[in-house]
Every structure is written in C-alpha cells, then in structure tokens.
Amino acid sequence: MATLYSTHCRSYSPLTPSPSSSSYSSYCSSSSSSSKLGHVAVSSSAPKRFLAAKLSVLSQNQNVARMQDGAVATAVTPIENDFPFKKLKGGLLSEPSTDECKDAVRFDINENESTVSITVVGASGDLAKKKIFPALFALYYEGCLPKHFTVYGYARSKMTDAELRTMVSKTLTCRIDKRENCGEKMEQFLERCFYHSGQYDSQENFAELDKKLKEHEGGKVSNRLFYLSIPPNVFIDAVRCASLSASAGNGWTRVIVEKPFGRDSESSAALTKGLKQYLDEDQIFRIDHYLGKELVENLSVLRFSNLIFEPLWSRQYIRNVQFIFSEDFGTEGRGGYFDNYGIIRDIMQNHLLQILALFAMETPVSLAAEDIRNEKVKVLRSMRPLEIENMVIGQYKSHTKGGVTYPAYTDDKTVPKGSLTPTFAAAALFIDNARWDGVPFLMKAGKALHNKKAEIRVQFRHVPGNLYNRNIGTDLDLATNELVIRVQPDEAIYLKINNKVPGLGMRLDRSNLNLHYAARYSKEIPDAYERLLLDAIEGERRLFIRSDELDAAWSLFTPVLKELEEKRIIPEYYPYGSRGPVGAHYLAARYKVRWGDVSVEQ
C-alpha cells in the first residue's frame, strides 16, 4: 500500500476526486483507435521503452485497469495512489490524523521503493533559473516532494554540477514565515541537483543522461518528469530523444511543455501530432502558468461554493465581463522572441482565454480534471471566432516623461525595423449559449502601459426602476455593482456597492467590500509554478491544457491573426506609459461598456 508522508502543501477532503476519472477514460478511448473497452490494448506507435514501462506497472498493480494510452481492462477499480487517505480494516477510508500531517500528497508507489527524477531541459535559460528551480526548492522547503527525488539540469551549455548549483543558488529564496533553517534547506536541496550537457536532438546524449539517472535511482521504481524549458522548434526533437533513450523503465514518464503551443491552428496541430508520436495524451502536461495563480484557482470556489454568486452568473444579471492584463515595461531586449508572436498569441490566446473559459463554464459533474476540462472545451466551442471589426491593435512609441525618454518598440535592437507586431490588443468576444448570449467578454492586454496588473472585472446590470436614481445622477454606470478579482499584484477580491454616506441627508457613494489577501492571510502565496509542478508530479491534470481544448482556442484566433498579417494592418501607436490606444475605448463604447480600470476609483 502506498505511504502517506507529512507536508504542508495540500489540503484534501474525502470529496477530493481521483485524477483518473471515468470521463477521462472515455475521452482516451474515443480518441485512440487502439483502446477498446473490455480488453487491454497497446498502441503500435508507442516506443518499446514506454510499452515495457506500462506492462511492468500492470504486472505490479493488478488492480490498475487503464493503461497510459487509454486502454481499459474489464474489472476497473480505483488506483490506490489516487486517494490521499489511509485504508482502515474493512476497506474504509479515513483522512490522515492531524498528528500525522495537516495536508497530504500522494505518489504512485511506496516512497521507500520509488523515486522521482525531475529533468529541466533548457536548464541554463532564464525561465529555469528564475522560476523552475526556485519553485522546486519551494516545494522541497515545504515538504511537498517525495523522500527520494533528484533534479537534473540538461542544456547545451558546458557546466559542472558545482557550477549549476552556484547558478541555481542565486535565485533561491525561503518563505518569509519560515526562515529559521533556510541555509540548511538550501544546501540539502542543492545536493540533489546535478547537470548533464547535451544536444536536444541527440539520442546518445539522452542515453548518457538515462545512465546517470539510473545511478541516482539505485534500482528503485523510477518515475521521471521532463520540463521542456526550450524553444518550441526543438520540442519534438527533445521529446523523441527523451522517450526513446531516457524514459522510465518501470514507472511513469511525464513531459511538461511550455507555451507557445504553435502560432496558429495548423502549427499547433502539427506540434500535437509530433508529440503524440512519442507520448500519450495523458503524459503531456501543457502548462499555462496563469492557471496556477491563486486567484484564478479560486474562481471556481468563489462561484460554486457561494450561493450569492452562482445565481447571478448569467446574462440575466451580468452586463459585461472584462479580462485585463497590463505591463508597465516593454520588451527590454526580448523583442526577438516577442516579435515572432505578438501580444495576441503571447497573452490573449492562452492566459486570458483560459481564464475566460474557467469563468464562463457550466457547473462540472465533479472536480475531477477531465470533468472540468470538458466544460472548458464546451465554452470555447460555443464562442464566435474573433473578427477584425471587434479588435483594436496598438504598438507603443517613444515618450518622454519627467525628463526620462522611454524607447519605442522598434527602438529595441532585437526588433526588426518597421515591425507591425502589436504590443497591445483589445477584443470583444461572445459566447453563443443560453447562459451568456449577448454578453460582451472584453479582453485587453498590453506592454509599456501605465501600470502592471491582471484582473477580472464583472460589471452587473443597472437596477431596474432604481428608487435612488435622483441621488445617483445621470451617469448610471457609476452606480453599477462591480465584482473585481485582482489576480496580480496585491491579490484581492472586492465588490463595489452603493452605500449611504452617514449624515442627515441622503447622499450615496460607492464603497468596496474588500477581501485583501495580504491583510486576511498571513501565509505567503505560493508561486504559480510551484502549484503546477506539484500537480504534474502527482498526475493531477486539472490545470493543464488538453489537446482538443488547445484546438478550440486556436480556432477562435487563427482567422483574425492571418488577416492582420496578410493585410499588414498598421497598429495604433500609443505613448510608452500611457493607458493604451484610444481605439480600445471606442471598441468598448460600441457595446455600451466602460473599461473598469480607467475610472478614478478603479
């Protein structure tokens, strides 16, 4: 039986769903011609090393009925590691006692007999240094990683283990509330970090990595996680080499893939097809780090566990919804990457659209990963493809403020001269279903704006026949209730209401019912990468993007992206540090909407 070990990283209840839901089994069997209910089948296209691993796991766990490629056996019983509970005599389940652990994390196989090897492919890059290694250390610091784990960096750069540890140590930080043993924990973590230099398209180099991993695994059941922190043009090469030469021999193998997932529908489909030559869908973890942010994960809790919100979550009460992303800096030397994608692909098609799908989805059957992802796909398939008439694009230009001159986008030496790539975009999208028919969902994203923030704004309808219209005045928008979910920075949820100002007269003003996270919770909010890495290790797919979900997302944006590029539409220029192009306000006004982030009170 699998063993629980104490952590402070997750809370589970007896209602927590198994990651291996029946809906996912049906999804896999419908998408794989080799998977038939009632017998075990193995896809002929899968590499021999993966097949051996699957068969080995089946032989060790006779109750495991579903293979990694979706095949299902007749007698289906839950996989033991899917439940974070102790099994009592008689087969009953109970939560771990508070004496044993507050929170629990489960892994597939007994911790004394298994190990997890995490390989960061592209370990010398900025993402690995600034996000992935610090997130792994934070998980170790909180006791969320298994007893036996190893972290390997893999990149083309020549580097020793000691040099990797020196590089990584510069970005590690400890939780503010737990700094008493920070140095000791860092040393322990760094002792588990190693490095192997190799090419991303070399099976020989990955075979050498495999040999080193086996030395650290010491004959235990090996589980391996590969994080692809590399350019998308080498994704498939790296996956091919890892799957054929460095996959787990007798445990699971999973691969985290960073965005961008292509540039349009065609390139995205080609990438998915390439990955699936070597991996099954449930081995691919497409990461969008915004889905790991605390306030985004709280969306479903806010809506589905509070009676006051769910009845209002429809066209009957909501006038419009706004998804706003702004950065107060430009490309700053990263223009080469950005110019190939632009703000629409970089932010809107993934981050904001994923949040929209979570916001607008119907109530899922359960909290199981596939039930939630099924509902998100339904929302995306109900949306109208974006038209150019419902979009405004912009690009920041040079601006002098306070004696300081800020550069234009095309002043960046890594950006081609005369580039028309948008650094700002605003769009109006619509969901053609019974719940949201006619409600505009407005998106706005841009660089070099006046502030840095990401937020969701829900503007409710006016009160019909409002008795206090005379006190409110002619601008009814100022009296509209608004729910604001500030994703970053300074996380908060607040509701704008109308209230009487104390005194003998009848004067109204707007007040906020405010849940400010820093004031309410003393615990430091984990970074999004911590949550997503932990989910990938556990096999929890709820916050990762499925291939059909990705297809549906690209189908909304691909037509307008092609039209913008083929017609070489010139963006509206806006000063560095401003609120963006004026055209964005005209777009909102067309649907009788005022952007919520431009008001005085915000």
Image (cartoon, rainbow, N blue to C red):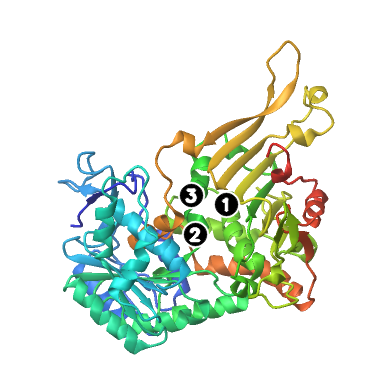
Quadrant the C terminus occupies: top right
Q: Residue at x 42, y 81 (%)?
A: 238
Q: Residue at x 51, y 77 (%)?
A: 232
* Spot occupied by residue 44 in the image (x, y as percentages of width and height): 37, 85
Circle nearer the N terminus (1, 3): 3
Number of numbered tags placed on the structure image: 3
23 left or right of 67 in image: right
* Amino acid type assigned to the residue bearing label 1 in the image: Met
- Binning the other alpha carbons within 10 Å of mark 2 as few (below 14), some (14 to 19) or many (20 upward) gives many
Asked if disc 1 and disc 3 are in contact, CB closer than 8 Å, the reply is: no
Q: Amino acid at mark 2?
A: His
Lateral position of residue 352 relative to residue 246, left or right: right
Which residue is denoted by mark 3 in the rendering?
A: 297
* Residue with the mark numbered 1: 361
Q: Earlier in the sequence, mark 3 or mark 2?
A: 2
Residue bearing mark 2: 289
- What is the quadrant of the N terminus in the image? bottom left
Crowd tier of the residue under label 3, counting other residues whose Cα lies within 10 Å: few below 14, some 14–19, many 20 or above:
some
Q: Which of labels 2 and 1 is toward the front?
A: 2
SS category of the residue bearing label 3: helix
CA distance separating discs 1 and 3: 14 Å
Q: Residue at x 71, y 71 (%)?
A: 410
Task: Identify whether 397 is placed above or below 96.
Answer: below
- Asked if residue 94 is positioned above or below residue 201 in the image, the reply reads above
